[in-house]
Image (cartoon, rainbow, N blue to C red):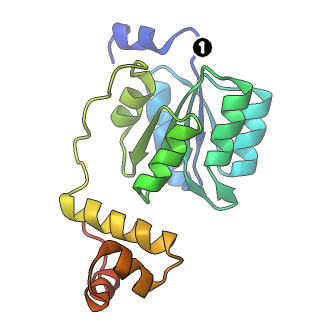
């Protein structure tokens, strides 16, 4: 990491990491400390909200799905306590609807797991009008299609017939797609 990159962090180097995957949380914390951040870790929504309330961070990386709730609840607390905080939402379930919800409540960016420390750093430090560089391993077209089908399926309360009607596809075709594992 260059001196210039460290100066981009700013005078307040506080970073809150919220994730219930402890090995991932520790690896990311270690990598972000090496990049110049002062890291605090939380493994739940409650712990993340407590830290955000007591010591609102300049930067935050929050997992969307946590054992005790939704990571967006932590993002809301951070936004209430510190409007200038830069927040990145991470998830293993990359869906368009959740990305939109995260950005609407104030997340700076949204990354799908597995995201490495460089992707997180780029997302945290990108300017407000500047787009971060494209990911090294973006979702395939098949994965994007699958994500869209899953989103509509969830919005239709997991009703196959209604989902098929809204997607303008045959119900049996949809059932075959839903029975398969997600593409990479």
> Which quadrant of the rendered structure holds the N terminus?
top left
Of the pair 155 and 107, the residue shown nearer to us: 155
Tell me what residue is drawn at x 46 percent, y 43 percent.
Answer: 27
Q: Is residue 7 visible?
A: yes
Quarter of image, res 118: top left
Q: Is residue 90 visible?
A: no
Left or right relative to 42: residue 156: left
Quarter of image, res 38: top right
Left or right relative to 26: residue 95: left
- x and y, in percent, of residue 13 in the image: 57, 18
Q: Which residue is mark 1?
A: 12
Relative to 73, residue 117 above or below: above
| Residue found at the far left of this picture | 141
Tell me what residue is drawn at x 25 percent, y 54 percent.
Answer: 139
Of the pair 47 and 22, the residue shown nearer to us: 47
Relative to 40, residue 151 above or below: below
């Amino acid at each position: 990491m260059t001196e210039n990159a460290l100066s981009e962090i700013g005078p307040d180097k506080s970073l809150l990491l919220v994730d219930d995957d402890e090995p991932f949380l520790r690896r990311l914390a270690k990598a972000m400390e090496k990049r110049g951040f002062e890291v605090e870790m939380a493994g739940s929504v409650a712990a993340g909200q407590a830290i955000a309330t007591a010591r609102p961070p300049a930067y935050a990386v929050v997992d969307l799905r946590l054992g005790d709730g939704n990571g967006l609840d932590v993002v809301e607390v951070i936004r209430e306590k510190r409007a200038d905080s830069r927040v990145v939402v991470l998830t293993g379930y990359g869906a368009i609807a959740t990305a939109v919800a995260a950005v609407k409540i104030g997340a700076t960016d949204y990354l799908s797991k597995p995201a490495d420390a460089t992707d997180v750093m780029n997302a945290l430090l990108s300017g407000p009008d500047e787009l971060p560089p494209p990911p090294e391993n973006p979702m395939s077209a098949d994965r994007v299609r699958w994500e869209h089908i899953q989103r509509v399926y969830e919005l239709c309360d997991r009703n196959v017939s209604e989902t098929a009607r809204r997607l303008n596809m045959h119900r049996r075709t949809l059932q075959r797609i839903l029975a398969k594992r997600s593409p990479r």
